Structure formats: structure tokens, C-alpha cells
Image (cartoon, rainbow, N blue to C red):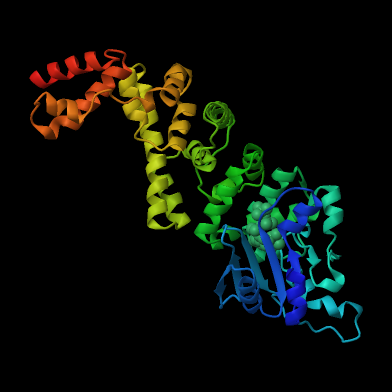
């Protein structure tokens, strides 16, 4: 369909990047990237019109995203070099523009394209040995300046190596180490650093990725005090155990990266975490959300370790102040003494509600009404601690409390 429209408009269109790699690896990928030789915004607008979709255009970058009513998105980018100085007789002249576009990409496995125009529909363009590297399980840059052009590619290399169980090619490995020595990472935008860490921590094999970051000395670019030692690895193992349990119990996936990031940062001083978040340059809301989480995890750990034992109601009140991923991080870090209480909290206590309500308190003529919510939480606490589990005993309990 894209191909037919490309023919009509006289453009050339290609499927590019990660989706081509994943088709060859027979993996699913819903991020469709299309490169247009011509004008991506113009193409995207016509494509959206024809399919009852919406096109959002980024005129400055000559890109556009088409959003279908069901939320499905397709990204369009204009081929980055329109034409190149090849002699007209050169055999590759026809593909010069797309070849240049692909040459600017990160790794050979991500630099393949599939032609979409009708006449040659489905032809794979692989100028840089991407297929061979997929077979050899290798991450390889296309040229020596790749990491200099974009140092965040080092983090991408780690992510892909771990995701596909690939190795970093020997030449790429040398360039990688060189980039680390040159301290190029200062140049990487904060949000990019955050996103790359988030993606790495969202990978199933993130522990291996962190080990690789340690090997290449990349952790220091997040913070000089950031460590991955045996203790930290054991903490990650505990976290994965509690996450498995959580998934199995509730058939729901909590936001993994936040829980894992909270564990990764849990030994850092508060000021270090603050530095990291400043470096990430997230928007105000995100900064607050993350700093709250990391702070709560740290404070909560210190408090739980000091307190050792406490009634279930106190434990519940404490845990319920935290978002689920943060509460899970605390659970992983706090150790076995709290294991039963953690599991009971997630499966039972956090859902407990009093069996009586404001209307009952009104009927009992309890005053002042401003105390109702306190009284009801006291009832809830008592119920969690097994002191009054039915309506009758809760009414008696609240009457006694009100008298006091
Ligand atoms: N790309 C690049 N350099 C970067 C980021 C991206 O060259 N620093 C190119 C790669 O060709 C990549 C494509 O842009 O395939 C799309 O980028 P992105 O969507 O981030 O990556 P994917 O390869 O699609 O990976 P994922 O499967 O994780 O989405």
C-alpha cells in the first residue's frame, strides 16, 4: 500500500532500521520506520488522508508520524542525503540516497532497508553486511567515527548485544573503549542518557547489560559512585524473585525499569541521586516522580531495618504510600525477615477496607465529622491486625474510640 502510493507520488520508499533487523531475526517489532526519498511530510499527509488517519508533521526535521484511529503509528523520515556525488554512470547511483541514509546509522544490523515501491517490492538492501553480522551474532559499527558522532550508541550496543546475545565485534570494541577514554558522554543529552538506561533496565537480561557497562567502564557516566558488585547483583536477584511472584499472583507487569533503577541507585547518597536526576533533565513531573520513588526507597529501607518487627497495619500504612514499583524495590532490599509481611501486604492488606462507613458514624451521631476519616482508618488498621473483622465489632470499636 505504501509502495503503490510512493509510485503515484513519484517517491521512493523503504522500510528501514530495527523492524528490518527483527523481520530477519523473525522477531516481532511494532515500530515501523519508513524512509522516503522525496518529502516524508507530503507522503505521510497523503497516506494519512487515504487511510482515515492523522499525520503529525515535524517540518524542521522533515519527518512525520501517521497515527491510525486505533493508536497504531508509522514513522516517516525524509532520506537524510537527497543525492550524493556519484558519477552518473556508477552502478549504485540509483540507491545513492538511501545508501547514505543507512550509512549514518549505528550498527550494520540496524542499517538495512527493504524497498517498498511496487516494481521492486521486498528487495533487501544490505550495503554494510548486516545479514552476515546477524548470522555471526555481531554488533559492528559502520565507520570509525560512529561513537564520536553519537556516543549514546555505546549504550545501544550494550542493549542490542544483550538482547540478542550478540558480541561486540573486535574493531567496534576498540572504538568503544576509545570513546569511553575520550569522555564523550558529557555531550550526550540528559534525556537520552535516561532513556538509554531505562531501555537497558527494561531488557530481560539487564543484569548482563549492567555487567557489560561495568566492563566498559560506562557506569561512571551516570555517577562516579555507581557500583555493580556481588551484593548489588544479589539484590537484583531478590528483586526478580519478588517480581516473578507479583506477576504470577496478579497477572500484571509493574513498571520494571523504575523498580530496577531504584535498586541500582539504592546505595548512592541522596545528593548523588539528585545529581543524576539533574543530569537527566526530565520534565518537572517526571523528575519529581523519580526522585520521590528513590527517596522513599532509601528512607523506607532505613526505617524498616531499624524497626525490625511491626504490626501489619503499620507495615501496610508505610508500604501503601509508595507506588508499586518502589514498594517492590523496598521488598527486595529489605531482606527475608519481611518476606511474609511483604507478600501479605500485596495480596491481602492493601485491599482491606472497613466494613462500616461515614453513614454509620452519622447514625451513631459521632462528632466532629472532621474526625471521620481518622476513625475509619483506625478501623481499617484494627481489621488488618485481626482485632475486629466484622461490622458489629467494628461499630463497637469505633464507639469506644469516639468516647475517648
Ligand atoms: N539509530 C541510529 N543511531 C541512534 C539511534 C537510532 O543510527 N543513536 C537508527 C538505527 O538504524 C535504528 C533506527 O535509527 O535501527 C531506529 O531507532 P530506534 O527506534 O531507537 O531503535 P530500533 O533499532 O528500532 O530498536 P528497538 O527495537 O529497541 O526499538
Count up the numbered dots.
0
Residue 173, x across and y down, in percent: 75, 52
User: Which image quarter: residue 314?
Assistant: top left
Q: Position of residue 292 (x, y in %)?
A: 37, 43
| Residue 343: x %, y % from top left | 46, 22
Left or right of 316, for residue 10: right
Figure quadrant of residue 108: bottom right
Residue 404 seen in the figure: no
Q: Is residue 378 visible?
A: yes
Does residue 127 appear to the left or right of 162 in the view shown? right
Question: Residue furthest toward the bottom?
Answer: 88
**As rendered, which of 86 and 390 lies closer to the eye?**
390
Quadrant, the C terminus: top left
Residue at (76% x, 69% y) in the render: 14
Tell me the quadrant of the picture where the N terminus can be found.
bottom right
Q: Which residue is at 57% across, 30% downward?
A: 240
The reply, left or right, for residue 18 in relation to residue 186 is right
Ligand 1 resides in the quarter of the picture at bottom right
Q: Nearer the viewer, residue 175 or 292?
A: 292
* Position in image of residue 199 (x %, y %): 59, 48
Residue placed most toward the observer, 245 or 116: 116
Residue 212 versus residue 51: which sits nearer the camera? 51
Task: Please name the residue shown 47% across and 33% down the image.
Answer: 329
Question: Is residue 341 found left or right of 260 in the rendered image?
Answer: left
Amino acid at each position: 500500500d505504501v509502495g503503490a502510493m510512493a509510485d503515484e507520488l513519484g517517491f521512493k520508499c523503504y522500510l528501514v532500521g530495527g523492524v528490518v533487523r527483527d523481520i530477519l531475526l523473525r522477531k516481532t517489532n511494532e515500530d515501523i520506520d519508513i524512509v522516503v526519498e522525496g518529502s516524508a511530510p507530503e507522503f505521510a499527509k497523503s497516506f494519512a488522508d487515504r487511510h482515515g488517519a492523522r499525520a503529525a508533521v515535524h517540518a524542521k526535521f522533515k519527518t512525520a508520524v501517521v497515527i491510525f484511529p486505533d493508536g497504531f503509528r508509522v514513522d516517516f523520515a525524509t532520506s537524510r542525503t537527497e543525492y550524493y556525488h556519484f558519477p552518473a554512470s556508477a552502478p549504485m547511483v540509483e540507491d545513492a540516497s538511501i545508501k547514505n541514509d543507512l550509512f549514518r546509522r549505528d550498527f550494520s544490523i540496524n542499517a538495512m532497508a527493504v524497498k517498498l515501491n511496487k516494481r521492486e517490492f521486498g528487495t533487501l538492501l544490505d550495503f554494510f553486511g548486516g545479514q552476515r553480522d546477524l548470522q555471526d551474532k555481531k554488533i559492528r559499527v559502520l565507520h570509525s567515527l560512529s561513537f564520536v558522532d553519537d556516543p549514546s550508541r555505546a549504550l545501544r550496543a550494550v542493549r542490542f548485544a544483550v538482547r540478542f546475545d550478540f558480541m561486540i565485534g573486535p574493531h567496534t570494541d576498540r572504538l568503544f573503549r576509545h570513546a569511553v577514554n575520550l569522555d564523550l558522554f558529557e555531550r550526550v543529552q540528559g534525556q537520552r542518557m535516561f532513556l538509554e538506561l531505562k531501555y537497558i533496565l527494561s531488557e530481560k537480561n539487564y543484569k548482563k547489560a549492567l555487567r557489560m557497562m561495568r566492563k566498559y567502564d560506562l557506569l561512571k557516566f551516570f555517577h562516579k559512585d555507581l557500583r555493580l558488585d556481588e551484593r548489588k547483583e544479589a539484590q537484583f536477584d531478590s528483586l526478580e524473585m519478588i517480581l516473578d511472584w507479583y506477576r504470577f499472583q496478579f497477572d500484571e507487569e509493574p513498571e520494571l525499569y523504575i523498580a530496577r533503577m531504584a535498586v541500582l541507585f539504592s546505595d548512592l547518597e541522596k545528593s548523588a541521586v539528585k545529581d543524576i536526576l539533574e543530569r537527566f533533565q526530565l520534565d518537572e513531573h517526571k523528575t519529581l516522580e523519580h526522585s520521590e520513588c528513590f527517596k522513599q526507597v532509601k528512607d523506607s529501607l532505613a526505617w524498616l531495618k531499624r524497626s525490625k518487627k511491626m504490626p501489619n497495619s503499620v507495615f501496610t500504612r508505610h508500604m501503601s504510600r509508595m507506588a508499586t514499583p518502589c514498594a517492590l524495590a523496598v521488598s527486595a532490599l529489605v531482606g527475608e525477615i519481611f518476606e511474609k509481611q511483604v507478600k501479605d501486604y500485596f495480596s491481602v492488606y492493601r485491599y482491606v477496607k472497613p466494613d462500616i462507613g461515614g453513614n454509620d458514624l452519622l447514625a451513631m451521631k459521632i462528632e466532629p465529622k472532621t474526625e471521620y476519616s481518622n476513625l475509619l482508618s483506625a478501623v481499617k488498621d484494627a481489621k488488618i491486625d485481626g482485632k475486629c473483622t466484622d461490622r458489629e465489632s467494628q461499630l463497637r470499636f469505633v464507639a469506644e474510640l469516639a468516647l475517648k
